[in-house]
Image (cartoon, rainbow, N blue to C red):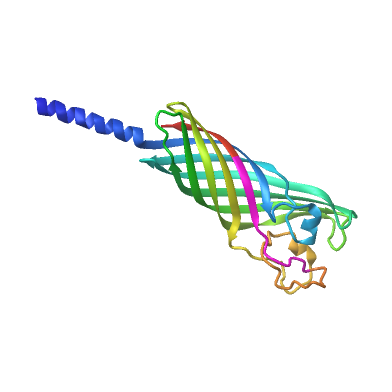
Amino acid sequence: MKKLILVILFSFSLISISSAQITAQVGGGLAYNLPQGDAGGTTDEFYKGTKYGLSNGVTFFAKARAGLLGTSFFAEIDYGKLSGDGNADENRGKVEVSLQNFSVKLGPEIMIDIPLSPVSPYLAPYLMINQFSGEVKFQGVSKVPSGTYDLKSATRIGGGAAAGVLFKLNPALKIDISLHYQLLNLFGKQFDAVDPTSVRRLDSYTSLNDDKDPLYSSTSDEHIISDKRSINNIQFKVGLMFGL
């Protein structure tokens, strides 16, 4: 009988320990994005083919976390739209550009446990798949017909890293605050044109075109993208997570 009681108590203790070390959470929130690298700049720089001319903006995200023994893995879906507008072509015309990004992120989270504290810092490197689309509008600039044009959808593979903190409000509710640096088009850069043999400046704007135009020439007004362009950002996130 004593052996049976000891076995039962030992089993319950294992269950308690395991439960305390298992993480399973879902949630979501908002992120504020600051374009970096060639993602920012002015609309005049976008017109000249050197940057994308995007301003700061907001992203929405949904997140799931699961783990054991201090190391967890997360999956996240982000959706955001960044835009920019202003003068171009020596103030002769106006340009409006918007870039939407649907992103899927996967990676580990290394939790730093602080005993008897409601705060749990973590570090998280991750990979991401980004689906870009958007729109550009020209009005009164030279060498490009005025009008509104769709940006051809493009997929790029990127990577990022985050430093974050979980604040436990109660056993089932946590605030998740994190700071990220992301390289959104780390792999897969390319230049697209409707007809690679034709001379059409508009093609430089209607695709993501983050690689050099193979027909680029410093004397050409049609083939203007002279180098690869990096789409990076800093992201500050705040979310609510529900679960263990």
The residue at 89%/57% (across/down) is: 90
Front residue (pair 99, 50): 50
Using residue 34 as the reference point, say whether residue 6 is left or right of it. left
Front residue (pair 7, 152): 7
Is residue 231 in the magenta section? yes
Which residue sits furthest left? 1
Is residue 240 in the magenta section? no
The residue at 21%/32% (across/down) is: 11
Front residue (pair 212, 180): 180
The number of numbered discs placed on residues in the rendered structure image is 0
Where is residue 186 drawn, in percent x and y? Answer: 58, 59
Quadrant showing the C terminus: top left
Q: Which residues are magenta?
A: 223-236
Front residue (pair 106, 230): 230
Rendering quarter of residue 18: top left
Using residue 64 as the reference point, say whether residue 51 is left or right of it. right
